[in-house]
Amino acid sequence: MMGFYFTNGVLMQKIIKYELLFIFIFTVLVLFGGVTFGILFFAGVAQTLILIFLLHIAYKNTGDTRFQTARRSIGVLFLLFIVSFGIVEGLLLKTAVQSHHIREEAPDAVIILGAGLKGHELSNTLRERLEKGRELLTVNENVPVVVSGGQGPGEAIPEADAMGAYLKTHGIREDRIYYDKTSTTTYENLRNAEAILRHEGLHNKKVIIVTSDYHILRAEKISEELGLDCTGLGSESPLLITANYIIREYFAVVNMMLN
């Protein structure tokens, strides 16, 4: 049966080799494969289930309780992961749905978070955020806006410059726009934006943060830690993009909670 009629030591070696092979393939895909985070996530889940099955078969064929102990330990950890994943994803989805409309009084300031360029060209995600922000700024004619995003790999200019140019092209006056051109993470986006608002005397005012709907939960939590009185306004993305990034957000949220 699948080569399991070996000594316990040989069987353990085969399972270890299987794990090492998967880790190697997984690493290659992450670094060079260009596959989405969602695909890698489901591959990891499938691999964990396969490992639990292999350990079960190994125990049945050898009677070695070490295989049973390993299977149970991995199974419990996997179950805890699935439960936590379900809870966080539920919160992300709830926050995303609620973020599509703002029903509160007009803000005193707006922050739009960057989302990547291709050379000089806006990514689809960034364009969606900017369009959502432009709608808000058009309704609230004199409200200032901070565009936040530095220059990353493959980007010809800082994201903030491209964001400002888009807003000006679509009717937002230059004197309303403040630039954060150095941030590279969500935390830096919001920390730098908070510093700009503080300098302009808007630190304790009502702020709306515009970002992708799946990103709202983390953006609001970070903003609260920085002392901002904020509400998130979420832009929508295509289903496949949302599905991929909302899975990635689980790990980002857990990392934020642990640090």
Image (cartoon, rainbow, N blue to C red):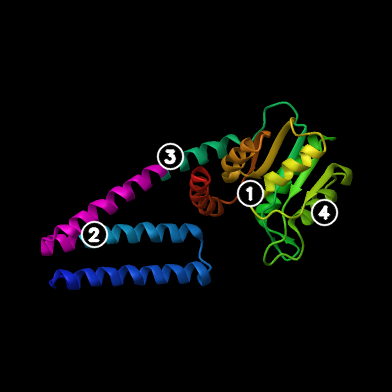
Q: Nearer the viewer, residue 134 or 145?
A: 145
Distance between the Cα atoms at labels 2 and 1? Answer: 39 Å
Residue on which the image places disc 2: 53
Q: What element carries label 1?
A: helix
Distance between the Cα atoms at labels 3 and 4? Answer: 39 Å
Q: State the image quarter where residue 16 is shown.
A: bottom left
Residue 65 is covered by the magenta coloring: yes
| Structural crowding at the residue carrying mark 2, measured as other residues with C-alpha within 10 Å and reported as few (<14), some (14–19) or many (≥20) | few
Seen as rendered, the residue at the extreme front is 259
Distance between the Cα atoms at labels 2 and 4? Answer: 55 Å
Q: What stretch is highlighted in magenta?
A: 56-84
Kind of residue sitting beneath label 3: Ile
Q: Which residue is drawn at 80% across and 52% down?
A: 166
Seen as rendered, the residue at the extreme top is 105
Q: Residue at x 28, y 61 (%)?
A: 51
Kindly check if marks 3 and 2 are in contact, taking CB atoms under 8 A apart as contact: no
Q: Residue at x 75, y 34 (%)?
A: 203
Kind of residue sitting beneath label 1: Thr
Residue on which the image places disc 4: 165
Image quadrant containing the N terminus = bottom left
